[in-house]
């Protein structure tokens, strides 16, 4: 019986976060947990191709990792007896008891550890993907376009900080949960966006980032059922990811929402996203508001049937909370659809005058579109050229050249 | 775990305060310290005299340099410290956030390198 490396890899990806999280709880240390799991995988890679994949591969790995964790602790003690840690058989028995159980919220605890605010944001992202997603260092490095050595160093430092600063493996209780949750959701959204919006990097790795972000958001939403924003984020990811296949053409050039073939949207994802969104009871937070916008698009069979008043209202609620220039730009675009381009132009002109988005090509492109629609073609072409001068890659360039509609 | 909580604030703000305002703030610190002491979490705590009273030593090329003032001139100065023994970083943060200097200065939370630990990393 043969087992391909791919199948072992698939099991690894599916089981990694769950098994590692329970090891972290029992061992109280990220490195020890990773070492034990790595030992177990090494054994699997050796044996499974020979003996076949066990019926319950996750349970096999869990058992192997637990045995190896205890072996390691015993060996360390023999080699380096420490008077400060007189861990005798009694303590090993305690660790074994902890290893035996698997608590439902182990992964949730680990998410809060990896997303602790005392870690730098980029460290939180890397640690979350490494610990919970089981992504390997080279994959994370490729996804974020940083050298492998840099990413490896970032992970080593982050793990050292968790250990040395005493960052807990706990889901914060009470008021602290409300304080910490937005930060966790932001990390997950960052992972998702990196996978969805980035036009650079390998398609396969980006796909995995989105799947992983959705998987983690699902864990948070399921285990914190009272938190509507967690559900809002999950709905937002599902409704956005549903458009993945339609958002770029065969050449990898982005396709605008209005031009997308809606028949290629993933109906199962949309149905799930809408169902989650319909279940929200509290006043929507920032992620739920963005999900409401995504839901409006998902419900419209054609661009012409979009419910613009709802989109405008959602953006206005977002602006009320935090008037970021990008949200205001999206709001202006929705105003253009609801009230016409002449109503939106002053809003976009104000953003240009403020200068925060001066280097953002889509601000100039949005202004160019509006100028063309009000018949100021000469000004529109100047604005398209401003946008084109600021693009980051070839796909964006071709996208904007198409919109400009003339050879540059 | 033990943590050192460093209380930083602009001394000029202290100087500008009325006696009543200062009394209120000192009272806030004392209240936290009393609670910590009551359940055994407080290892030590002291208020420091202003940075102008500091003396800094450096030995370079075998020569001892003694200078007036703190090791670095900064907008905020170290004004006091607490050492607490608590479960983890979140427990230390829960204490640190109650100090008044969080509102107008800052509190730095530093884990203490316990001498019984091996190399630490």
Image (cartoon, coloured by chain):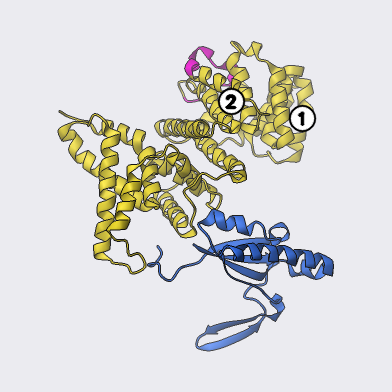
Which residue ends up furthest to the front in the rendered image? B38
Residue at 52% x, 52% y is A119
Residue nearest the observer in this picture, A398 or A9: A9
Residue at 17% x, 29% y is A2
- Image coordinates of residue A90 in percent, x first then y, are 30, 57
Judged by depth in the image, the label closer to the viewer, 1 or 2, is 1
- Image coordinates of residue B58 in percent, x first then y, are 56, 82
- Mark 2 element type: helix
Residue pointed to by mark 1:
A347
In the rendered image, residues at marks 1 and 2 fall on the same chain: yes
Residue A397's quadrant in the figure? Answer: top right
Chain of residue at mark 1? A
Q: Is A304 placed above or below B81 here?
A: above
Label whose residue precedes the other's in the sequence (1 or 2): 1
Residue pointed to by mark 2:
A401
Chain of residue at mark 2? A
Q: Quadrant of the C terminus of chain B?
A: bottom left
Of the chain colours in the picture, the one used for chain B is: blue
Residue at 70% x, 81% y is B53
Q: CA distance from mark 1 to mark 2?
A: 24 Å
Magenta-drawn segment: A252-268
Whether residue A375 is visible here, answered yes or no, is no
Please give left or right for residue B71 compared with residue A378 in the image. left
- Image coordinates of residue A222 in percent, x first then y, are 50, 31
Callout 1 crowding tier (Cα within 10 Å): few <14, some 14–19, many ≥20: some
Residue nearest the observer in this picture, A102 or A13: A102
């Amino acid at each position: 019986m043969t087992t391909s490396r791919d199948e072992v890899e698939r099991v690894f990806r599916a089981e990694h976060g769950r098994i590692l999280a329970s090891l972290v709880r029992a061992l109280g240390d990220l490195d020890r947990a990773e070492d034990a799991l790595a030992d177990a995988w090494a054994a699997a890679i050796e044996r499974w191709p020979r003996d076949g994949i066990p019926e319950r591969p996750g349970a096999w790995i869990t058992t192997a990792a637990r045995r190896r964790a205890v072996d390691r602790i015993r060996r360390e003690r023999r080699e380096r007896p420490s008077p400060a840690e007189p861990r005798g058989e009694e303590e090993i028995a305690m660790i074994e008891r902890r290893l035996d159980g698997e608590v439902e919220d182990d992964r949730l605890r680990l998410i809060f550890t990896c997303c602790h605010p005392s870690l730098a944001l980029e460290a939180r992202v890397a640690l979350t993907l490494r610990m919970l997603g089981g992504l390997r260092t080279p994959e994370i490095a490729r996804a974020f376009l940083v050298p492998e050595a840099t990413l490896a160093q970032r992970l080593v430092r982050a793990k050292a900080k968790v250990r040395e600063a005493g960052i807990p493996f706990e889901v914060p209780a009470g008021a602290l949960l409300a304080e910490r949750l937005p930060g966790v959701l932001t990390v997950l959204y960052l992972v998702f966006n990196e996978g969805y919006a980035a036009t650079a990097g390998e398609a396969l790795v980006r796909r995995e980032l989105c799947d992983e972000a959705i998987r983690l958001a699902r864990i948070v939403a399921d285990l914190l059922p009272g938190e509507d924003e967690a559900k809002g984020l999950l709905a937002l990811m599902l409704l956005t990811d549903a458009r993945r296949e339609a958002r770029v053409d065969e050449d990898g050039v982005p396709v605008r929402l209005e031009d997308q073939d809606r028949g290629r949207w993933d109906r199962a994802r949309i149905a799930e996203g809408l169902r989650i969104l319909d279940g929200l009871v509290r006043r929507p937070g920032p992620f739920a508001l963005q999900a409401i916008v995504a839901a409006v698009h998902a419900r419209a069979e054609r661009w012409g049937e979009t419910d613009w008043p709802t989109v405008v209202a959602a953006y206005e609620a977002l602006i009320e909370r935090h008037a970021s220039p990008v949200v205001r730009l999206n709001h202006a675009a929705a105003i253009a659809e609801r009230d016409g381009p002449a109503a939106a132009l002053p809003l976009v002109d104000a953003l240009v005058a403020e200068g925060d988005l001066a280097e953002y090509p889509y601000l100039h492109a949005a202004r160019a579109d509006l100028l063309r629609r009000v018949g100021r073609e000469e000004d529109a072409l100047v604005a398209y050229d401003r946008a084109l001068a600021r693009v980051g890659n070839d796909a964006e360039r071709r996208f904007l050249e198409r919109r400009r509609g003339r050879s540059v | 775990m033990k943590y050192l909580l460093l209380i930083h604030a602009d001394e000029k703000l202290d100087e500008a305060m009325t006696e009543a305002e200062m009394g209120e703030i000192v009272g806030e610190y004392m209240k936290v310290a009393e609670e910590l002491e009551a359940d055994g979490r407080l290892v030590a705590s002291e208020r420091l005299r202003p940075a102008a009273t500091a003396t800094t030593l450096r030995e370079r090329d075998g020569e001892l340099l003694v200078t007036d003032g703190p090791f670095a001139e900064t907008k905020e100065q170290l004004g006091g410290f607490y050492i607490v023994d608590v479960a983890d970083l979140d427990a230390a943060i829960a204490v640190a956030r109650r100090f008044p200097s969080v509102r107008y200065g800052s509190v730095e939370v530093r884990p203490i390198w316990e001498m019984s630990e091996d190399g630490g990393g």
